[in-house]
Image (tube, rainbow, N blue to C red):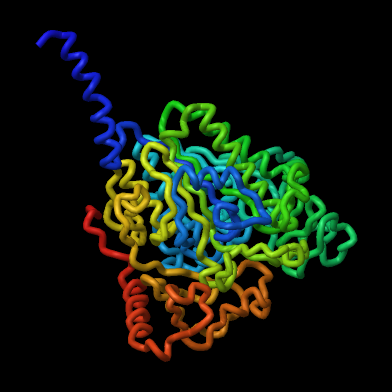
Amino acid sequence: MNGSLIICLAALLLPLTALSSAASGKLRSKPNIIIILADDLGSGDLSCAGATKIKTPNIDRLAADGVRFTQGYAPSATCTPSRFSLLTGEYAWRQSAKKNTILDGDAPLCIEPGRLTLPAMLRQAGYQTGIVGKWHLGLGDGKTRVNFNGDVNPGPLEIGFDYCHIIPATVDRVPSVWIENHKVIGLDPVDPIEVSYVKNIGDAPTGLKRPDLLTRFGADEQHSCMIINGISRIGYMKGGHSARFKDEELPKTVVAKSVEFIEKHKDAPFFLEVGLFEPHVPRVAAPPFVGKSGSGLRGDVIEQIDWEVGEIMKALDRLKLADNTLVIFSSDNGPILFDGYFDRSEEDLNGHQPTEGLRGWKYLTYEGGCRVPLIARWPQQIKPRVSDQLFSLVDIYATVAQLTGQELTAGAAPDSLDLSSVLLGKTKKNVRDNTVLHGIGGLALRQGDWKYIPATEKMKPGGMGSGANAADPRFAAANIPEPLLFDLSTDPNETKNVITSHPKKAAELAKELNTIIAKGEARKRPEAKQ
């Protein structure tokens, strides 16, 4: 056989080899991975899910080019536990209370350094890892108060990220600053930062005593502490004036730093987590988005989210990275309207349904609190479709491990299941047959079309962050005096408790939930190795 013929045959076989590799779910070149996590976004907040008062064309494009899961779940109905589960592959309720609550801005790091987290696992696989935006998993070792004037650690860099540009907690909690790697950005050393969630440590006005100084909207007592940028926050902060962020500039910073990371690492596989701040309170729309939606301020900031997603997608297109980049878009929990600030989110709803009519909201284990948007696009591997298969954010860890050829060691990601076959459309079955949902009142179990919520003890104050009041209607609904059983196939909005007509099913699910709790992991996975 002459040399020319060999070259021709090789050229013909090369595409077949690539197709075979793609069909097996393993590419010769590892995909870039971007997780974009919104904050308090509902399953019905996107126009691709049927919203008409809010337009999200960029997110709609993600969905049109990939898979949109209608049964996507956050592991918890609150932010810190869901983010813990995403990065560790473990349900947060298995851990101590600090993983189960909404952390304050000076809380210690709740993921122990040295743990094989999602970014740490990907770093072992040769990825550059970064996080931009919301963090909310604590900083410091807890032995001493967080020193925001020196090296702020341990933090993201100690649990697997190579780079971070973050705010410590939620936008409504102090300190209202950006941290890049271990340093507060723009800090003047002659104006050091001091933080307290116990008492007012300075003479600055508070929202409670000087509501006349609020430039946007008033707030409840919990959110009426320190006033920063005309908005009262949770907690007190002294100093750091030059480092304080401006709410209306947050989305621009998230986009700039995300694109900067992508550009820097375009020639090697990278993992980037983008923590968006919207539509969490306090809701502030940048000038181009003020009044843009048909659903008030909350709708405006959701359209702002769509712009942020679009700018990141533009960067991938410009750098010719889109085809081999897995982009996952979701939210850390379900939506809520009033959440401490009187910003007319309820009055201006204008018929919009953030939960698509599902019962409940953020904080609660009802479907409205844990069902979230979940979209994945990877043009080289994912065929466009809408899927009703179960997929939890806790499963991203094991799924990504499989896609990047990493084996899970025993004990790693104990509650994370490999759903790569679901993601890539290789099966129509539910690989995950159940998921445990966590809220401020306790746990619930969804198994198949059935949903079981145990009775809860009367909720006590605390566990929701500083100043939260258990009597607040947002939290009081977590008090469930008797067990609930719902058949979601006929009652997706959880309106009818059918436990009296299906007592055996309720007992079966109660036993299964207790077994999952006792086992210490969701399922024994044969692929786990010592």
Q: Front-most of 518 and 399?
A: 399
Query: Residue 359, relative to residue 111: is it above or below?
Result: below
Q: Is residue 178 left or right of residue 231?
A: left
At a point 68% along the width and 77% down the height, the residue shown is 472
At a point 76% along the width and 70% down the height, the residue shown is 221
Q: Front-most of 428 and 450?
A: 428
Residue at far right of view: 212
At a point 57% along the width and 65% down the height, the residue shown is 356
At a point 81% along the width and 60% down the height, the residue shown is 217
Q: In this view, does 289 lie to the left or right of 499?
A: right
Q: Picture coordinates of residue 225 (x, y %)?
A: 77, 63
Residue at far left of view: 1
Q: Picture coordinates of residue 200 (x, y %)?
A: 77, 62
In the figure, residue 49 lies in which quadrant?
Answer: bottom right
Q: Front-most of 194 and 527?
A: 527
In the figure, residue 251 lies in which quadrant?
Answer: top right
Q: How many marks?
A: 0
Q: Picture coordinates of residue 425 (x, y %)?
A: 34, 50
Image quadrant in which the N terminus is located: top left
Whether residue 458 is visible, yes or no, is: yes
Query: Residue 450, relative to residue 528: is it above or below?
Result: below
In the figure, residue 132 lies in which quadrant?
Answer: top right
Q: Front-most of 205 and 3?
A: 3
Whether residue 240 is visible, yes or no, is: no
Q: Picture coordinates of residue 203 (x, y %)?
A: 84, 58
